[in-house]
Amino acid sequence: MYTDPIYKENETQVIHMFKPEQKVKGDIIFLHGIGPNNVPYLEWYGRYFKKFGYRTSVVILPYHLSRKPNDVEDGDPYYSPEPNECTVLFHNSVKDVRRAIDLLETFDDFSENHLYLMGVSFGGIIGTMSLALDKRIKKGILMITGGNWRWINFYSPYTEKVRERYAKEKNSFGCDSEEFCKKFRSDAANFVKNNINSIDDIFQKTPITCYHYDSLSYAKFVNQPVLFIKALFDKIMPHKATNELQNLLPNKKVKSLLAGHKSSYIFKRIVGRWVINFIEKDQPQEIWERSNKREEVLGSNR
């Protein structure tokens, strides 16, 4: 059962905070991936960013580490086939992000103009929703992530347990296969592009509840500058999911790694430099718009 966390400075169960010894230049909210092993190695970024003067708050998402019952694997409830359950779970995660920002605003050295968010994998899904819903965040970094539950639930090797539950028990909407899913999501990206014009539309105009927690639904409303980092050999996040989310983000700069989902960690220092350069470089709006379709590929000759 989810309960609202109480945030405190140096709270170890909800936020792992990495604070620089020197003056704080800004704050980065960091969102980890799903599962039991993601948090410790991704916290490398918190230690890296603090060297550059950025306080990094790793928000421990619900049902991870100490925020889960002992008999539940980290993140497992997020694999529910029930859209109504997932809507609650995902939006509770967004609420955690926003409450973390509430906490940061109480600090004397907090700067409202220097608040950023970085989300990796599943953290990028929650990060996309958070960027759309909370404009206190000035820039976002979304890494090895995507949108559209059709591609993620039916093509990612990490969601096999969802597919098994669909086949065995269906869900409350009757979904038992991709064929059923296509009735409502045959072209979800264009449906969102052409029909969803406000956050309220996500809840009022979509044909099925799974749109309510789909990062694809929120992408158009992320008007902050976004650094979108993808792995060209990613097999865990389907390419269609990555590309559809990328295409709907209106104000992004794209960089690509010659890596897979997990092996992208090998390039953590390069990614770290990309992130610091991105948040410290103030570019005019027209430059961002010109860069929307440009990709910089690590190791390319372009």
Image: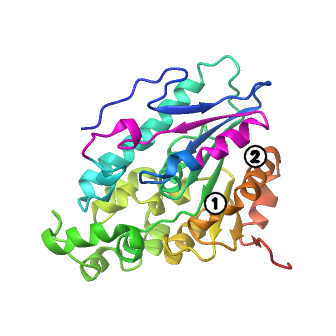
Task: Left or right? Give the position of 215 relative to 80.
Answer: right
Which residue is drawn at the image coordinates 51% and 46% (left, top)? 39
- Tell me if mark 2 has few (under 14), some (14-19) or many (20+) residues whose alpha carbon lies within 10 angstroms of its own: many
Q: Earlier in the sequence, mark 2 or mark 1?
A: 1
Q: Along the line of sight, which residue is nearer the eye, 269 or 3?
A: 269
Task: Left or right? Give the position of 291 relative to 166.
Answer: right
Membership of 167 in magenta stretch: no
* In this view, the mark in front (2 or 1): 1
Which residue is drawn at the image coordinates 47% and 65% (left, top)? 147
Q: Magenta region: which residues?
A: 42-71
- Tell me if mark 1 has few (under 14), some (14-19) or many (20+) residues whose alpha carbon lies within 10 angstroms of its own: some
The quadrant in which residue 10 appears is top right
Residue type at mark 2 is Ile
Residue 265 image label: 1
Task: Left or right? Give the position of 176 relative to 64.
Answer: left
Residue under circle 2?
279
Task: Left or right? Give the position of 233 relative to 37.
Answer: right
Residue 272, how many percent across, how many down? 73, 51
Note whether 57 is above or below 169 in the view shown.
above
Residue 127, how many percent across, how many down? 53, 50
Farthest right residue in view: 301
